[in-house]
């Protein structure tokens, strides 16, 4: 197998014989893409007869690199779970080229220097663009607003106290009013804690049978409703994180019909799993909000199909084996997701014909890009050459032990998924590849340390 990095080193090359998945145009066509200086220089339809340095795409599908709006990188403070470096490797392995990092590290990312630290770490890793989300309140304690302006100056892309809700509606109101000064995005972890406190899983028939404390849907829905009303009151740009309940989809549908600037994401685990999967007390099925019922799953899918929900994000939340390998009630909330998101979406939405491939890819590229206002996520001339090369038909079995993340708490352990990433390009360089050599599957990571790979 030719070393692609060598070919790409000069900066200019053609990636040929690919099926181009254009999420904005909503179509797939055979063609070639010219990359130059970290950008897409040309997208050419049809058989390629040109000259220059060539990478043979071998008939694989090519889409914009994925954009994940919701990732916990754990650094600083919880490096035993994940670091920016290992999180970026995990992203590259999953075809993710831009991610938003949540602020619930230790210390909390609540001032400009902490935003700058994460960005510097990401530049050193050179495997994925990392856009830090700054905390809404100092220490995410819900009491005093953090300096949003200073964090914005250092490159914070949005604000959230994710991990916890902002319990005080007055503080959320002020954060939304402030965010309007820069037209920045507020990302809401929507949870009414007085209803969810002590809860371990979705409140329903399974929680009763297992004897576990429940978290009712209303805990999420009441909070989503509050955020929507505050967004209407302030005119803020609001994004609802990790939607698990069908009722929340209805609230967002109404908000959009009213013309409010409200968007929403759900996650692969809510689409593929439900509360019955908790029956074995498997702590790898424990996250917050929890896996709900089939009826919620169907409402989430419908929300993605009709455009009520805008994005699929992972809520990648690594935890060590020691932490997770305890009685269900003592295990922390959270599962990993960066390396399985594309496959999960193909398996759940594309394979059964609920969405076509460009529409599914849009939920993980062009649509999240529009939410945070970045130029990535498009497969057109002039866009950054952040690309994912994948086989949408390859079937594989998820094995947590094979992950590039520091933690292996995948909720999909042992599941067979369809669609697999073969290569990921960041700013025109292949940062991850999976290939066959001597009959064996091999993987390589090659950081792109060029300035084009850093966040502008
Ligand atoms: Zn959250």
Image (cartoon, grey):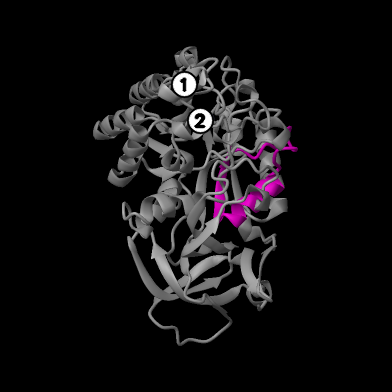
Which quadrant of the figure has residue 440? bottom right
Residue 3's spot in the image, x, y percent? 68, 75
CB of mark 2 within 8 Å of CB of mark 1? Answer: yes
Q: What stretch of residues is rendered in magenta? A: 72-101
| Crowd rating for badge 1 (residues with CA inside 10 Å; few <14, some 14–19, many 20+) | few
Q: Which residue is mark 1?
A: 209
Horizontal side of 331 relative to 20 (left or right) equals: right
The answer to which of 128 and 56 lies nearer the viewer is: 56
Number of numbered markers: 2
Can see residue 241? no
Task: Name which of mark 2 and mark 1 comes first in the sequence.
Answer: 1
User: Looking at the image, is 200 positioned above or below residue 237?
Assistant: above
Q: Which residue is mark 2?
A: 279
Residue 364's spot in the image, x, y percent? 45, 50
Q: What's the CA distance linking mark 2 and mark 1?
A: 9 Å
Residue 248's spot in the image, x, y percent? 35, 29
Which quadrant of the figure has residue 219? top left
Q: Quadrant of the N terminus?
A: bottom right
Identity of the residue furthest to the top in this view: 194
Horizontal side of 369 relative to 93 (left or right) equals: left
User: Looking at the image, is 153 positioned above or below residue 413?
Assistant: above
Identity of the residue furthest to the left in this view: 257
Q: In the image, is the residue at mark 2 within 8 Å of ligand 1 by its beta carbon?
A: no
User: SS at mark 1?
Assistant: helix
- Residue 19's tag is none
| Crowd rating for badge 2 (residues with CA inside 10 Å; few <14, some 14–19, many 20+) | few
Residue at x 35% of width, y 33% of height: 296
Is 357 one of the magenta-colored residues? Answer: no
Horizontal side of 386 relative to 47 (left or right) equals: right
Horizontal side of 419 relative to 263 (left or right) equals: right
Can see residue 162? yes
Which quadrant of the figure has residue 449? bottom right
């Amino acid at each position: 197998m030719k070393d692609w990095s060598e070919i790409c080193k000069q900066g200019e090359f053609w990636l040929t014989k690919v099926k181009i998945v254009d999420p904005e145009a909503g179509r797939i066509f055979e063609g070639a893409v010219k990359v130059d200086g970290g950008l897409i220089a040309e997208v050419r339809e049809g058989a390629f007869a040109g000259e220059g340095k060539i990478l043979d795409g071998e008939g694989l599908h090519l889409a914009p690199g994925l954009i994940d709006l919701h990732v916990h990188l754990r650094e600083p403070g919880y490096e035993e779970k994940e670091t920016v470096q290992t999180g970026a490797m995990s992203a590259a392995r999953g075809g993710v080229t831009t991610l938003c990092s949540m602020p619930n590290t230790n210390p909390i990312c609540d001032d400009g220097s902490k935003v700058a630290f994460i960005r510097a770490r990401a530049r050193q890793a050179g495997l994925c663009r990392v856009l830090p989300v700054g905390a809404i309140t100092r220490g995410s304690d819900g009491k005093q607003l953090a300096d949003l302006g200073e964090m914005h100056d250092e490159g914070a892309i949005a604000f959230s106290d994710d991990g916890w809700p902002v319990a005080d509606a007055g503080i959320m109101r002020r954060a939304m009013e402030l965010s309007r000064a820069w037209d920045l995005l507020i990302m809401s972890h929507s949870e009414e804690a007085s209803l969810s406190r002590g809860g371990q899983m979705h409140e329903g028939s399974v929680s009763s049978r297992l004897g576990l404390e429940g978290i009712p849907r209303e805990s999420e829905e009441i909070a989503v409703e509050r955020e929507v009303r505050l967004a209407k009151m302030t005119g803020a740009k609001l994004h609802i994180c990790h939607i698990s309940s069908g009722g929340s989809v209805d609230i967002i549908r109404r908000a959009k019909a009213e013309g409010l600037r409200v968007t929403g994401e759900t996650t692969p685990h809510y689409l593929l799993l439900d509360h019955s999967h908790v029956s074995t007390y498997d702590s790898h099925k424990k996250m917050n909000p929890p896996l709900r019922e089939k009826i919620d799953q169907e409402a989430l899918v419908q929300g993605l199909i009709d455009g009520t929900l805008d994005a699929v994000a992972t809520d990648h939340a690594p935890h060590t084996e020691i932490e997770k390998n305890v009685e269900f009630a003592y295990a922390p909330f959270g599962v990993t997701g960066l390396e399985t998101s594309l496959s999960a979406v193909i398996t759940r939405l594309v394979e059964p014909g609920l969405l076509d491939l460009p529409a599914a890819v849009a939920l993980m590229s062009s649509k999240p890009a529009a939410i945070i206002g970045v130029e990535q996520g498009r497969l057109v001339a002039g866009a950054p050459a952040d690309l994912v090369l994948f086989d949408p038909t390859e079937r594989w079995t998820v094995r947590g032990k094979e992950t590039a993340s520091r933690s292996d708490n995948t909720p999909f352990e042992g599941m067979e998924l369809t669609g697999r990433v073969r290569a990921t390009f960041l700013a025109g360089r292949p940062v991850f590849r999976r290939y066959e050599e001597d009959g064996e599957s091999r993987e390589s990571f090659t950081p792109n340390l060029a300035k084009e790979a850093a966040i502008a």
